[in-house]
Amino acid sequence: GRGLPPIADALRRLTDAYPEAQLIIAHGGIADLAALSEAFAGRAGVFFDTSVWSPIDLLDVFSRISPEQVIYASDYPYGQQPSSLTIALRTAQVAGLDDGQIADVLGGTAARIAAGEAPREPSRPNGALTLSQPIAFARIHHYLAMATPLLWTRQSDTIGVLGLALNTTRERDGHAEVRERIAELLDCARDLWKTVPEVEDEQRRMHLGRTTFRLIHLADIEAVTAVA
């Protein structure tokens, strides 16, 4: 999660004290990922789950952590469908996992844990240390990253960041299908976002805000994973 103090050393002491225990590090360990990956990458029985907001965070996890150590998670607030499944699947594909490894991430490894089976021996991480993508999609990601805190703090899009992202989807860069999907998601998000301040019912307003966020999140996943 966000704002945690460094946790890698304490967890390493815990796993050393209980070597037979299996440990699942939530939210990809992003609060202390560098230290956690140094401590646990390649260590059978320690797992990192995929419940994160940023696809870039998850790509970093795949660059540091063995596929056998990554498991799908759908816990709140990042794990709502369809974004939680989309982010896990798309980043795994970009990281170069094969079909068998992806199947294990999405359920096979968790099934082994639930059945009390011994964990598989970790292989080398698949992911790359760099991300290459068309500049237009990097721009879209940048604008959507600007939009997210506005939504979280219940502000209107006074800056016009969704408009900037939508304008960028019109660039002709050879990725028409992806651009069209992003544009459709952002068109819906923009229309919903405009209605949020007009809604008096608090529960309804929260629902509209969260739906807007989910649409933007899906668009961002598309943008980040649209590799060159």
Image (spheres, rainbow, N blue to C red):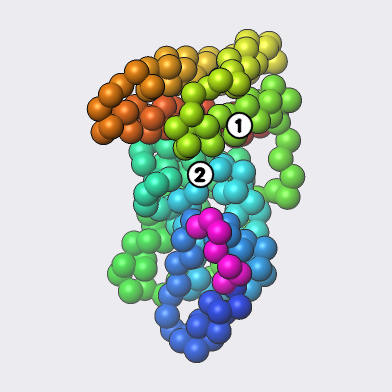
* Residue projecting furthest to the bottom: 17
Structural distance between the alpha carbons of marks 2 and 1: 14 Å
Quadrant assignment for the C terminus: top right
Is 4 colored magenta in this rendering?
yes
According to the picture, the residue beneath numbered tag 2 turns out to be 53
| Residues in magenta, as a range | 1-7
Residue type marked 2: Trp
Q: How many marks?
A: 2
Where, by quadrant of the figure, is residue 191 drawn? top left
Q: Position of residue 13 (x, y in %)?
A: 55, 84
Say whether residue 17 is visible.
Answer: yes
Q: Position of residue 92 (x, y in %)?
A: 54, 45
**With respect to residue 203, does 48 lie above or below?**
below
**Left or right of residue 51: residue 208:** left
Prevailing secondary structure class for the magenta stretch in the rendered image:
loop
Badge 1 density bin: few <14, some 14–19, many ≥20, Cα 10 Å: some
- Tell me which label, 2 or 1, sits earlier in the chain: 2
**With respect to residue 184, does 150 lie above or below?**
below
Q: Residue at image x 31%, y 67%?
A: 114
Is 196 colored magenta in this rendering?
no
Q: Which mark is residue 146?
A: 1
Q: Which mark is residue 11?
A: none
At numbered mark 2, what does the secondary structure look like: helix, strand or loop? loop
Say whether residue 226 is visible.
Answer: no
* Residue projecting furthest to the front: 200
Badge 2 density bin: few <14, some 14–19, many ≥20, Cα 10 Å: some
Q: Position of residue 222 (x, y in %)?
A: 54, 29
**Left or right of residue 31: residue 214:** left
Residue type marked 1: Met
Q: Nearer the viewer, residue 200 or 47?
A: 200
Q: Residue at image x 67%, y 63%?
A: 34
